[in-house]
Image (cartoon, rainbow, N blue to C red):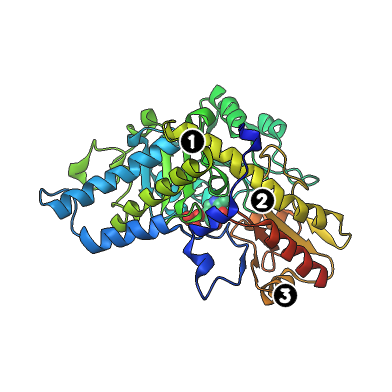
Amino acid sequence: MTLENIKLDIDYVRSQFPAFDDPLSKDWSFFENAGGSYVPQNVIDKLTEFMTSTKVQPYAEYPMSKIAGENMDKATKLFSNMINAQENEILIGGSTSINLYVLSNALKKYINPGDEIIVTNQDHEANISPWRRLEEVGARIVEWKFNLQNHELEISDLEKIISSKTKILAVTHCSNIVGSVNNLKKISEIAHRYNTIVIGDGVSYAPHGFPNIKELDVDFYTFSLYKTYGPHLALLYGKEEILKELPNQNHEFLRGNYPYTINPGGPNHEELVSLIGIHEYFDNLYKHHFNESNSSTLEKISKLNKLISDHEEVIANPVLDYLNNRKDIILIGKNKISNKDRAPTISFVSKKKTSREISEELVSNKIATRNDNFYAWRCIRDLGLDINDGVVRLSMVHYNTEHESIKILEALEKI
Ligand SMILES: Cc1ncc(COP(=O)(O)O)c(C=O)c1O
């Protein structure tokens, strides 16, 4: 069977997520995945195992502690393999917002008065305010604005504002409102011509397929693990050659122990270990579909990404199509996903009802969603929308079904 013929076995996928059988959540169609995803049983098991037998201070010689430490290291190692990074290029922190704040603090010493930093108006605030804050040390902030007609960040506009003065470029891989996938590889290529450090926000991208970091060639990249089927943690990748030059923000005597020293403290141990469960889940998903287990982690992830994006196209395109064809609705971003150029994160507003009214009505139809600016308030403002009412957002991942998409269409038709 060729890869083209293999389809995601959605029943298998859903059988791995206890939330679909839980009395509280089982009757709901869950479309708030860009807010945070459900977790597979593997993650819950790893968390329980850690809390039951190894919840002690790690890295001592007695077995409970030794195993705790080994599993913490294993979690980081597995994740570095999944995204094609080195183990010493990965930092696990409490959230993407915290990670980016800590990173901006570390990069501060490289900024001199008159240096420029490019931020966008399409990003979530987590990848804007830590960089705007560097005005304090004399940085000039330049905004890369999205095209108001198609809501896209145009590379040609970046080329007009980037220069040898640009020290940092902070840009989202995929907007949590517009949904478009920005060409980070191309963006990095342009930025590196000017020795500009690229900070990619992968929070809305990674739930739809883990990125190959080395291919993107970004300098830093971050995503929230609680949106990629894990606990409330976030991953920050940094190129080793830059990480090792960053100042120690941890205890003085730890100097030299990068990347550990970038964060003022360590991650939550039990949650870190439960990340092994995400790897297990994807490994099982691979075995289930491809009936072999000898490929490298990266090859497995690459094939799974294709399976996932094909499924996401099937479930999201009918909803995009419906919204796009309604005269009383304004759909944000592209009206179709093709070749993974858009995430199934679908935002819209109505010309007749507030976003709040629509999301309440969707909720009363047992569709879990919400309206908001989702902290991308500059994007909402520049789209000419009310930043308090925001958009209605229906965000899907691979465990959503075609049947659920039909439920959305029926509910929207009724509303
Ligand atoms: C695109 C994007 N970037 C950053 C963040 C911030 O992530 P965290 O909640 O881990 O700080 C979010 C959260 O929704 C997001 O959607």
Q: Nearer the viewer, residue 360 or 383?
A: 360
What's the mark number on residue 333?
none
Determine whether label 3 and label 1 are within 8 Å by CB. Answer: no
CA separation in Å, label 2 and label 1: 22 Å
Query: Circle 2 is placed at which residue position?
Result: 344
Q: Position of residue 210 (x, y in %)?
A: 51, 41
Q: Secondary structure at mark 2?
A: loop
Going by the picture, which residue comes out furthest to the top? 193
Does the closest atom of ligand 1 sit within 8 Å of the Cβ of label 2? no
Q: Secondary structure at mark 1?
A: helix
Of circles 2 and 1, which is in front? 1
Say whether disc 2 or disc 1 marks the residue closer to the N-terminus.
Answer: 1
The answer to which image quadrant residue 70 occupies is top left
Query: Which tag, 3 or 1, sits closer to the chain's start?
Result: 1
Whole-Å distance between the Cαs marked 2 and 3? Answer: 21 Å
Amino acid at pointer 3: Glu
Q: Residues within 10 Å of mark 2 (few under 14, many from 20)?
A: many
Residue tagged 1: 300
* Image-quadrant location for residue 293: top left
Answer yes or no: is residue 116 visible: no
Near-viewer residue (83 or 42): 42
Crowd tier of the residue under label 3, counting other residues whose Cα lies within 10 Å: few below 14, some 14–19, many 20 or above: some
First along the sequence among labels 2 and 3: 2
Circle 3 is placed at which residue position? 361
The three-letter amino acid code for the residue at tag 1 is Lys
Amino acid at the residue labelled 2: Pro
